[in-house]
Amino acid sequence: MSFASPFPQVQIPTTSVYDYLFADAADAAERVALVDAATGAETTYGDMIARIDAFAGALADRGIGVGDVVALLAPNSSAFAIAFHGILRAGATATTVNALFTAKDIGKQLADSRATLLVTVAALAPQAVEGAAAVGLGADRVVVLDGPGAAVDGHPNAEDLAAAGTPAPEVTFDPATHLAALPYSSGTTGNPKGVMLTHRNLAANVAQIRPLQGMTPDDRILAVLPFFHIYGMTVLLNAALHARARLVIMPNFDLEKFLGNIQEHRCTHAFIAPPVAVALAKHPLVDSFDLSSLRSIMSGAAPLDEELGNAVAARLKCHVVQGYGMSELSPVSHITPPDGGQQAIGSVAPLSSCGWTVPNAVSKIVSDEGVEIDPPASGLSETGELWFKGPNVMAGYLGNDEATRQTIDEDGYLHTGDVARVDSTGCVYIVDRLKELIKYKGYQVPPAELEAVLLSHPGIGDAAVIGVVDAESGEEVPKAFVVKQSGAELTEAEVMEFVASHVAPYKKVRQVAFIDAIPKSASGKILRKDLRTV
């Protein structure tokens, strides 16, 4: 049977993202909205909205509007926030591009999304220009916000855009069907696909999570997760702005700067991915900073091990919780409030869980045989695939009806591809991805479980596990890729013996490789497909 959200229903917005976030922002005009941590530059809500409107006007002046796609390739900054919302305000669709992409990757997304304009920054201009040229976009269609300007190199910059002084256009579209954003799925298990997210999808997800995040106008939110990824786009950029909080923006992750910004700006909330949790739990640098302002840390984008999360909470003396989502869900489908759920549910979700279904939505756990698994009277249910239905479910994959049909069924449930369990309160526990489960002698071995064991070893700084075919037996076996802690002496045999002492015999690691770094997406997911070429 399906199980509904235990949280009170919320009103799902029927307006555009711009109107939902900023329609009543006049009272906050003088509040600081954005702080570029690298420079200390501050942008108030009033100035930010004025700049968003001006950006939308500049796009309209160039013929960009409803039906057009604009690509945005940039690291986190106030300029990213303004450009992103300016694109949406103009009625166009923003396809956000991974800042780590090569020219070939950029060109592939430009072509697939049919973007007619690319907005970027000078640091990424070489690959942006090359990628754009490959799909026929000339210099005048590549805006380099901090570049020298069209008169110098042919690429318009921010000043060129503002020169016309065109006001924001009057645009008309249906928020329920009009695409606001077109991010691409991370491609951890295959080729990335364009995820069609409507204005209703994005606004609905903010409405669903806002009552459960605990953010207020007095909060200062450390924003290091990339805005081009749906996690940073919704949970940080949109939700924090809706709360009228202050976003302290970092262009990328650097542990010392991360800790320094919490100390300097007295940040109250941080949103991270598990690799950051590893650093917070183990790195000696953490003890050199005053992190007492920090009240909560939310982890997402990949499963957070309970032992690791508890180690972070104990060391930083703050709440640590995790949620769950995916690009196709705008992204949040399951969430744990900062207090662990004590006030809303009457119990605290263990850190091994990802929390409860968000408001106005329902979930299911479905076995391999297609049988719905009921929440148990006590303990945890059997495992099955997690299905989800709510107003934040994507419109589909761009130009890929078959993939859409395989993911969203006729009843509107999105099949997540993740294996999960549920407890008696409806709290969900992610076991692993269906496509990443290792099949050893008929047993299912979750890589995430073995990675958690590996990370508990004091000599291991990071780890990942994949299934590989054993040359002698022809069977799939678990192989661990291990990054040693600085100065640690560790052999392959010691790693295998350590894991064997903590898991069932069929789950033992049977191959080990030591590498310098685990390949990960910008959102923190392990790129297992890249490990297959190591």
Image (cartoon, rainbow, N blue to C red):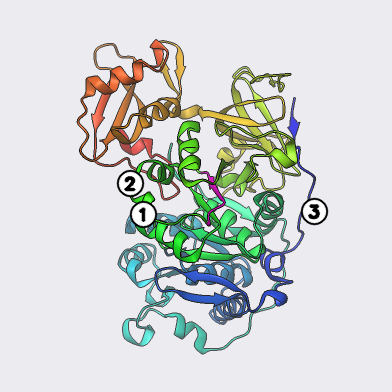
Where does residue 77 sit, x and y in percent of width and height?
A: 46, 68
> Which residue is nearer to you in this view: 133 or 21?
21
Q: Is residue 125 visible?
A: yes
Task: Identify the residue at image location x=37%, y=32%.
Answer: 455
Relative to 349, does residue 75 appear above or below in the rendering? below
Q: Which quadrant, please, contains the N terminus?
A: top right
Of circles 3 and 1, the one toward us is: 1
Confirm whether the magenta stretch covers residue 297: yes
Q: Which residues are magenta?
A: 293-300
Q: Looking at the picture, which amino acid does disc 1 mark?
A: Ser
Say few, some or many: other residues with alpha carbon within 10 Å of mark 2 (under 14 / 14 to 19 / 20 or more): few
Identify the residue position indicated by label 1 in the image.
288
Relative to 331, does residue 203 appear above or below in the rendering? below
Q: Which quadrant, please, contains the C terminus?
A: top left
The reply to whether discs 2 and 1 touch (Cβ–Cβ < 8 Å) is yes
Q: Quadrant of residue 319?
A: top right
Identify the residue position indicated by label 3 in the image.
11
Q: Looking at the picture, which amino acid does disc 3 mark?
A: Gln
Mark 3 or 1 closer to N-term? 3
Mark 2 or 3 closer to N-term? 3
Relative to 118, does residue 301 appear above or below in the rendering? above
Q: Quadrant of residue 511?
A: top left
Where does residue 151 sit, x and y in percent of width and height?
A: 36, 87
Left or right relative to 394: residue 42 = left
Identify the residue position indicated by label 2 in the image.
284
Q: Which element type, helix, strand or loop, lies under badge 1?
A: helix
Q: CA distance from mark 3 to mark 1?
A: 44 Å
The reply to whether discs 3 and 1 touch (Cβ–Cβ < 8 Å) is no
Say few, some or many: other residues with alpha carbon within 10 Å of mark 1 (under 14 / 14 to 19 / 20 or more): few
Q: Which element type, helix, strand or loop, lies under badge 3?
A: loop
The reply to whether discs 2 and 3 touch (Cβ–Cβ < 8 Å) is no
